[in-house]
Amino acid sequence: MPSFSSALLRWYSENGRSLPWRNTRDPYRIWISEIILQQTRVAQGYEYYLRFIDRFPTVEKLAEAPQDEVMRLWEGLGYYSRARNLHAAARQVVLQGRFPQDYAGVKALKGVGDYTAAAICSFAYGLPTAVVDGNVYRVLARYFGIETPIDTTEGKKLFAHLAQELLSVRQPAVYNQAIMDFGALQCTPRNPNCNTCPLSESCAALAEKKIELLPVKSKKTAVSHRYLIYILILRHNANEEALYLRKRPTGDIWAGLYEPLLIEFPHQPEDAEIIARLEQLSLLGQSSVLKPIVRNIKHQLTHRLLHCSAFTLHAPQHPPTDFIAVPLSELSRYAFPKLVNIIFDTMDLSAAKEVRLSDSHRGESALSLQ
């Protein structure tokens, strides 16, 4: 189908984006860019890519870095398993002696799937491997009027086969970049610019008025709700305060990042429930003071809505176990989830109302405002 491919290549020659990872055939740099751009807009990923390459210019530099440093540089991008996998894969490459040079070898790297392997092989080695990302799904579904859901096994096979069939064997890298840019800039998810589209005369979705209906997804993942209470336990030293932190475990969101004490409830808790939980943890003493920082802020993840409140706790009865006390001046050395950084940004301890434990009602886990 040369008309489709040639039209895209002509469009790309006039409208393609100039991006730093397109000016190299280095598989390491292309790999870094592709991992960063998973679930991340180009505008946001651009600066992260430059910082990452500046700090880790080679795969050897990345492999020898501590994971905490990699996570700190990734802070704010989200989907932190990408950073952990990137670090692990860099060590794989160093052990192997060089970056893999074929599709199977690239895909064997931790965190690399079909799309990323195809992109690296195409852009770094000029191999005829078609990429299929969200932009490609959208362009192909609209132009050919395909209503097969893209999130089914049948749909994935259909689109992968079609993308490979359309690929320009002579210019695979340029063609792959062209169709992705076309989806990102011209055939956008909302309000695509059909008036200036070079494919408009033969676009099935435009002719059938189905632009907003394609591509089709069959599944809608239900949003789950989680109720988080952060307790920022502060320790007073002679010169400055320190905050107790722990590294989040594997098997849940934000694994490998740092956070203050977290208490999770199956519902939005009352203050008395929070106090009761702190008493169970033996964290409350006669002089303990709670200060609310934020109340019920909402933080959206892909399929989760987090409801979060946060308090500071001064003078705990016992410091929490398995936590480290970090001076406030050294917090920048640690990587935190975005939600925790939001809490840090809103902290104003002098302005917060104090919430003291009422000695006369301690057995009832009551709070009193002063």
Image (cartoon, helix red, strand yellow):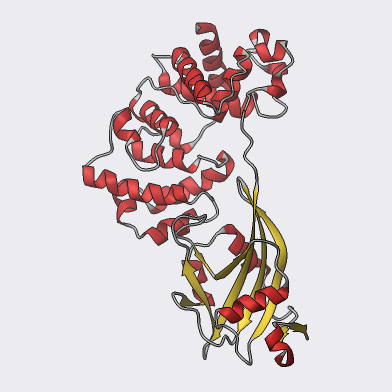
Measured as percent of width and height from the top left, residue 120 is found at 38, 32
* Quadrant assignment for the C terminus: bottom right
Instruction: Tell me: 170 left or right of 319.
Output: left
Residue 357 in sight from this viewpoint: yes
Q: Residue at x 58, y 58 (%)?
A: 338
Q: Please, is residue 93 above or below residue 366 in the view?
A: above
Measured as percent of width and height from the top left, residue 339 is found at 61, 60
Foreground residue, 53 or 160?
160
Q: Residue at x 51, y 49 (%)?
A: 79
Extreme residue in the front direction:
363
Measured as percent of width and height from the top left, residue 155 is found at 53, 22
Foreground residue, 84 or 1?
84
Q: Residue at x 44, y 36 (%)?
A: 21
Q: Please, is residue 211 above or below residue 134 in the view?
A: above
Q: How many marks?
A: 0
Q: Residue at x 59, y 64 (%)?
A: 340
Instruction: Tell me: 106 left or right of 11.
Output: left
Measured as percent of width and height from the top left, residue 89 is found at 33, 45
Q: Please, is residue 277 above or below residue 93 in the view?
A: below
Residue 58 in sight from this viewpoint: no
